[in-house]
Image: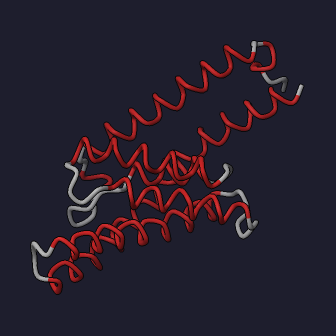
Amino acid sequence: MDNPLKQLSPLVRNGLNGVVIVTSIFICAVAALWHHSAWEMTGISPDWFLIWVVAWSVKRPAWQGIVGGVGLGLIQDGLTGHQPTHALSLGIVGLITALLQKQRYVSEDFISIALITFAMAIISATVIAGQLSLENSRPLAEIWQQHRQIALGSAILSSLWAPILYAPLNLWWQWLIEAEKD
């Protein structure tokens, strides 16, 4: 099958890529705000922004992973409140995911994306719990007790939903790379 993007100018391809990126982030924002029983477990939902950062960072340099993570973290802070900040945790997720790709520890398939998302959800939740611990607004035992439940629930749900978001984005970005080769 011939890549339909090859017929478009680089400017149009970049514009379409921007539309795909913004639209996918908007879908993640809506999904994060819309609590549906089909994707919740004990009141915990998938971390859609984290899934997007993993999908974005897995094939990009570390600096792009950090920028994507911090950017989506700031959007998530705007939707949920800025204390604790999600920019730090998602920036770290973007960095680690990009470094995993650089070292070729992972292959590009749905199982590896799910496993990366699982690990990154635990790291992200741990960074958030660490920030809460530094605030001293609640007892440490309470924070870390909730952390275990939130981290595991988020990791399981996010890893299960990750391939659904990753597949179309990965396909789109592969088409772009192929179109730019000629």
Q: Nearer the viewer, residue 79 or 133?
A: 133
Q: Quadrant of the C terminus?
A: top right
Q: Residue furthest bottom?
A: 141
Q: Residue furthest right?
A: 182
Residue 112 horizontal/vertical position (percent): 63, 64
Q: Nearer the viewer, residue 135 or 107?
A: 135
Q: Residue at x 80, y 13 (%)?
A: 7
Quarter holding residue 136: bottom left
Q: How many marks?
A: 0
Residue 30 horizontal/vertical position (percent): 31, 37
Residue 17, placed above or below residue 150: above
Residue 68 horizontal/vertical position (percent): 50, 45
Left or right position of 62 against 29: right
Q: Residue at x 68, y 20 (%)?
A: 13
Q: Residue at x 66, y 66 (%)?
A: 100
Quarter holding residue 126: bottom left
Q: How has the structure been colored for display? A: secondary structure
Q: Residue at x 65, y 42 (%)?
A: 170
Residue 107 horizontal/vertical position (percent): 73, 62
Residue 60, placed above or below residue 105: above
Q: Quadrant of the N terminus?
A: top right
Left or right position of 42 against 67: left
